[in-house]
Image (cartoon, rainbow, N blue to C red):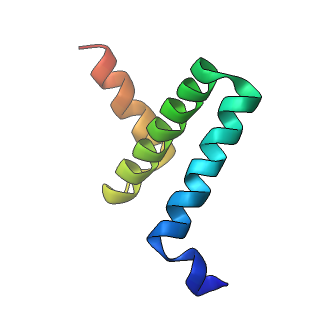
Amino acid sequence: MQNLLKQPPVIGLLTGLLIAVLFLALGFWRTVLLLLLAGAGWWCGSYMQKHHLTPNDFIVLIKSMLTK
């Protein structure tokens, strides 16, 4: 089962199935918003990990960017 989940076609199938279920359950725009916010959260987390930032450091960074 572990090897099956690492294959790209299976990952693509499961991703497509999840998005289809979200479209049916939430509607198009709510699903788009959910995917955008999840992507933004993933990007923030990967940025913090890459630059070894704590959540407080990241908040200070965002505040400094918004006040310029």
| Residue at x 40% of width, y 57% of height | 49
Q: Position of residue 10 (x, y in %)?
A: 55, 68
In the image, residue 41 sits, relative to residue 48, either above or below, namely above
Q: Nearer the viewer, residue 56 or 45?
A: 45
Instruction: Classify the position of the C terminus by image quarter.
Output: top left
Quarter-wise, where is residue 4 in the image?
A: bottom right
Q: Nearer the viewer, residue 67 or 29?
A: 29
| Residue at x 76% of width, y 30% of height | 25
In the image, residue 16 sits, relative to residue 59, either above or below, namely below
Q: Nearer the viewer, residue 39 or 20?
A: 20
Q: Position of residue 33 (x, y in %)?
A: 55, 24
Quarter-wise, where is residue 67 in the image?
A: top left
Instruction: Classify the position of the N terminus by image quarter.
Output: bottom right
Q: Position of residue 48 (x, y in %)?
A: 39, 50
| Residue at x 28% of width, y 23% of height | 65
Q: As drawn, which residue projects farthest toward the right?
A: 25
Q: Is residue 11 left or right of residue 48?
A: right
Q: Position of residue 35 (x, y in %)?
A: 53, 35
In the image, residue 11 sits, relative to residue 32, either above or below, namely below
| Residue at x 72% of width, y 26% of height | 26
Q: Is residue 61 left or right of residue 34?
A: left
Q: As drawn, which residue projects farthest toward the top?
A: 67
